[in-house]
Image (tube, rainbow, N blue to C red):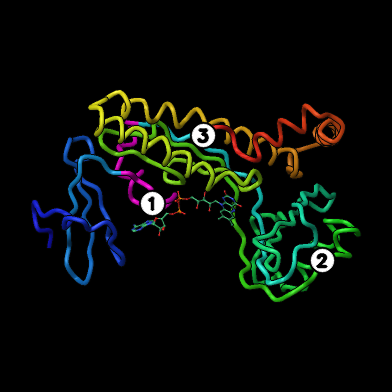
Amino acid sequence: MVSPGSTCPPGKAHVSGAEDVALHDIESDAPSVTFRRDGRVERVTARFIAGCDGFHGPSRKAIPASAGREVERVYPFGWLGILADVPPCNHELIYANHERGFALASMRSKTRSRYYIDVPLTERIEDWSDERLWDELAVRLGPEAAANMTRGPALEKSIAPLRSYVFEPMRHGSLLLCGDAAHIVPPTGAKGLNLAASDVHYAVEALRGYFLHRDNDAVATYSARALKRVWKCERFSWTLTKLMHRFPEDGPFERAMQLAELDYIASSDAAQASIAENYVGLPV
Ligand SMILES: Cc1cc2nc3c(=O)[nH]c(=O)nc-3n(C[C@H](O)[C@H](O)[C@H](O)COP(=O)(O)OP(=O)(O)OC[C@H]3O[C@@H](n4cnc5c(N)ncnc54)[C@H](O)[C@@H]3O)c2cc1C
């Protein structure tokens, strides 16, 4: 049962094990969040809600559809990834655009590696034994990387669909969306977490402006400020995805464009600087 008017206990900064989370009155100056814990429904009331609950969380869904717009591109493939306790095959990431498809060699640490290949969305994870995946990686990454690749059992193995998605504006009333709650990028540019962090930076600035300086504009401009960076990261992630994958609809012209672009990047300091600037992360 919801206890009307109850608020978060003073100093209570974190609640774990919350279920049935729902947002209320987000267009008012006293929005609240209800949740069920240990069989009881509790309510937290605040001046603002930061919706940092990922793509499937309740925050974005609390905004009326007519109050914003969704822009989306769903890609015709997913990434089959393997995480294993093996040393990386190279100290740098390797992105490969092979005739059999995309591959990425990346790492979490000196002893833990993360590898990906792209697969049609119809592929089933059960059909990919660890050995089959290592074999495919060895082919797509090429002989030099394959010679340095250590194989090992999968700690985790999954297929993730790829999409580009933005919900805008990122603020509705007293609700500020941050991170995957507002946008998704294909993982090619490794920008998802980076974008979530920059959204939080802008949200903190907005809330500081409001509470410390009574600056209503700070909150009013949150969405526009965050979206400027979001759209640039969407652009970079989409560009890199187009460059590194073979799309079913692509023909010889698109393939020639990919090769010309890769050759340009390999031979131009300006192109390399641009990729590096975007990959490391645009200024906040
Ligand atoms: C396979 C894969 C590889 C990736 N690799 C990279 C990478 O290399 N670099 C990078 O920058 N990004 C990467 N990302 C993207 C990155 O993980 C996300 O962009 C980032 O985690 C978004 O952070 P977030 O806090 O917005 O959302 P999330 O990390 O999704 O966090 C949302 C939180 O809200 C909680 N939550 C949601 N709904 C509810 C509810 N109803 N009640 C209570 N709690 C709820 C969730 O439990 C979760 O803790 C990758 C993603 C995937 C899937």
Residue bounds of the magenta highlight: 50-67
Image coordinates of residue 270 in percent, x first then y, are 77, 26
Does residue 199 belong to the magenta stretch? Answer: no
**Marks 3 and 2 in Cβ contact (< 8 Å):** no
Residue carrying label 2: 149
Residue 217 sits in quarter: top left
Q: Residue at x 64, y 67 (%)?
A: 125
Sequence-first tag of 1 and 3 = 1
- For label 3, the crowd category at 10 Å Cα-Cα, with few meaning under 14, some 14 to 19 and many 20 or more, is many
Tally of marks: 3
Image coordinates of residue 135 in percent, x first then y, are 82, 67
**Marks 2 and 1 in Cβ contact (< 8 Å):** no
Query: Under 8 Å from ligand 1: the CB of mark 1?
Result: yes
> Image quadrant for the N terminus?
bottom left
Disc 2 secondary structure class = loop
Gap in Å between the C-alphas at discs 2 and 1?
A: 36 Å
Residue 136 sits in quarter: bottom right
- For label 1, the crowd category at 10 Å Cα-Cα, with few meaning under 14, some 14 to 19 and many 20 or more, is some
- For label 2, the crowd category at 10 Å Cα-Cα, with few meaning under 14, some 14 to 19 and many 20 or more, is many
Query: Under 8 Å from ligand 1: the CB of mark 2?
Result: no
Q: Residue at x 17, y 48 (%)?
A: 45
Sequence-first tag of 2 and 1 = 1
Q: Nearer the viewer, residue 45 or 9?
A: 9
Q: Nearer the viewer, residue 280 or 121?
A: 280
Residue carrying label 1: 53
Q: Amino acid at mark 3?
A: Val
Residue carrying label 3: 230
Q: Amino acid at mark 2?
A: Met
Image coordinates of residue 5 in percent, x first then y, are 8, 51
